[in-house]
Amino acid sequence: MAKDIRRIFELFETSPVLVAAYDEFDRLRYANEAFRSAYFIEPDEMPLWPDLMRRNFHARRGTVICVADFEEWLRSTQSRRGNSGTGHLKPICSTDVGFG
C-alpha cells in the first residue's frame, strides 16, 4: 500500500493538473509542481488559503479576481469553502489562472 501511495504522489508531481490539499485550518499541506507554479508558491511554503489569495490578488497573478472589494469577496468565499452543494467556488473572471 505504501508503494502505491508513493506512486500516486509521483504521478501528481509530474501531472500538468493542479493538485493541492489543505488541512482543516485552510493551510496548504501538499501541492504539486503545477499548482505551485500557477499560484507562485515556493517548494517549502505552506500558506493559508486566504493569505495566498490576498498575496496573488495584490500582485495581479494566480487566480484572476475581478471585484471592487477584494476583502468582501474573500470573506464571502471563505464562508463557502469546504461546503457541499452551492458552496463550490465559481470563477470570478473568464480566465481562472494568470493574467496572460
Image (tube, helix red, strand yellow):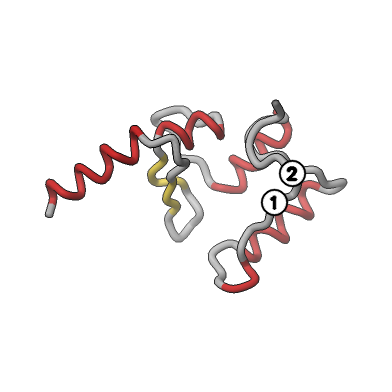
Q: Which mark is residue 91?
A: 1
- Labelled disc at residue 19: none
Q: Secondary structure at mark 1?
A: loop
Query: In the drawing, does residue 3 fall left or right of residue 26?
Result: left
- Residue at left 55%, top 29%? 40
Residue at image location 41% in from the left, 40% down from the top: 31
Q: Are marks 2 and 1 in contact (CB under 8 Å)?
A: yes
Q: Look at label 2 and name its amino acid.
A: Ser
Residue 82 screen position, x and y as percent:
54, 65
Q: Residue furthest right?
A: 68
Q: CA distance from mark 2 to mark 1?
A: 7 Å
Q: Residue 16 at x, y = what percent?
A: 44, 35
Kind of residue at disc 1: Pro
Residue at 61% from the left image edge and 63% from the top image edge: 88
Residue that numbered label 2 is attached to: 94
Q: Nearer the viewer, mark 2 or mark 1?
A: 2
